[in-house]
Image (spheres, grey):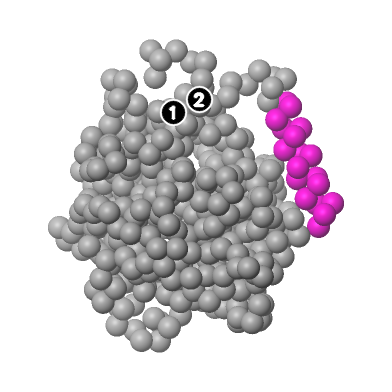
Amino acid sequence: MTALRSRIWQAAALAAALTVGLGVAAPAAADETCNSPYTASLIKGQEDFVHVWTLGVPGMGDGQDKLVTIAANPTSAQYGKVIHQVSVPGRGEAHHMGFTDDRRYLWAGRLDDSQIFVFDLIDPAQPKLVKTIGDFAPTTGFVGPHTFYAMPGRMLVQALSNSKDHGGATGLVLYTNAGQRVQQMPMPTGKLGGVQGDGYGYDIGINPAKNTMLTSSFTGWNNYMMDLGKLIQDAEAMKRFGNTMVVWDVKAMQPRQVLAVPGAPLEIRWSLKPGDNWAITATALTSKLWLVKQGADGQWQAKDVATIGDPAKIPLPVDISITADGKGLWVNTFMDGMTRYFDLSNPEAPKQTYELQTGKQANMVSQSWDGKRIYITSSLLANWDKKGADDEQVLRAYDWDGKALKQRFEVDFHALKLGRAHHMKFSARPSGQPLAAR
């Protein structure tokens, strides 16, 4: 594995050298704060585009899943408007995306049919579909590629389920940036550090300084493809959610410790402040914030540090976004459509300082690197979204002045017959391109 890791870094260095030698323009210097630390050339100014991975709806437009691009720079004449869309064949529960380490390609996955689509963003205003990986499930035995996490020259994919029983036991798959499968690792099911692994997976977060990767846990295909109302009434199904996080050695790509984190811990966000070396997650079913950090003995510990809304009402925390300085956290809760801000100045005791109902249902939340702009999308899963008038499908953009959110624009995906708006990624024009061309 050491040799494999060395080859990964050698490939990344070679790719960087070729990029410089060929004179390829680097991205402009505004990124959401959840990108992999191996992602090059973070955009720390104004994002030009927001790309939304969108679930198709039967009878709405072409009915297919698609990548929708929206102009996000206020200087653009098309600000707040859809400027491009590219459909992929069929509908398969479009869900999450991730950039390769060089930001050239955007990988996007589907949770139902397990297909992966790779888009070329050499012109970020017009992403192009250049590759489809259609054999994820048959070649790995895993189902539901969820998180796409850049590593040097590689893409690490966390799955949610498996092809044997469609339950929660699953694993990780490592690909080259070109889409060739390199390695796969099952999620641990034995005891590590005194805690029993449940085999479930969801998100990935890496701290290179600590050679540590965290993974979280959710549920399998049988649950996430079930109607939410039916699921809640099924006592046995509700038992089939993850209650762990796993600590991995990144260089060895081996699990070292299992942490007990009951209630389906979802997104993982490491503090981005150098030297902090702690991460935070939110549990969907118990509505808690959990802090993960090392104890005095060097072992990693998970601690319940705050409550989100009223857990008795199951607000269902779904996405979180940490500020670039590690001092604040945005939390979206799906059922009540609330967006909350927590002060993380003391990560051992986060305090909610602001809230706003940003929709009838709220799912993903992404912020710019400078923390001045917040974006919200509404769709969770096709069978979990609300019904009737509450089935709101939007992207909303806000300015944040540190005291209140002010809405700047809204894109109504249903009105435009685009489908259900889910995951977002930001991009920008190459730094050398004139502003007039934006």
What is the quadrant of the C terminus in the image? top left
What is the quadrant of the N terminus in the image? bottom right
Occupied quadrant, residue 293: bottom right
In the image, which residues are magenta? 1-18
Which of the labelled discs sits on residue 154, or is there none?
A: none
Q: Residue at image x 44%, y 28%?
A: 45
Q: Give the residue at the far right of this rendering.
A: 3
Residue, disc 1: 45
User: Is residue 242 something that shows in the picture?
Assistant: no
Position of 431 compared to 305: left or right? right
Position of 232 compared to 45: left or right? left
Position of 244 compared to 385: left or right? right
Q: Position of residue 102 (x, y in %)?
A: 61, 35
Instruction: Measure how far apart labels 1 and 2 are at the Cα level.
Output: 8 Å
In the rendered image, the vertical position of residue 389 relative to residue 327, given as above or below: below
In the rendered image, the vertical position of residue 194 relative to residue 13, given as above or below: below
Q: Amino acid at mark 2?
A: Ala
User: Is residue 432 something that shows in the picture?
Assistant: yes
Occupied quadrant, residue 118: top right
Q: Main secondary structure of the magenta part?
A: helix
Q: Position of residue 392 (x, y in %)?
A: 22, 53
Residue, disc 2: 28
Q: Secondary structure at mark 2?
A: loop
> Is 6 in the magenta?
yes
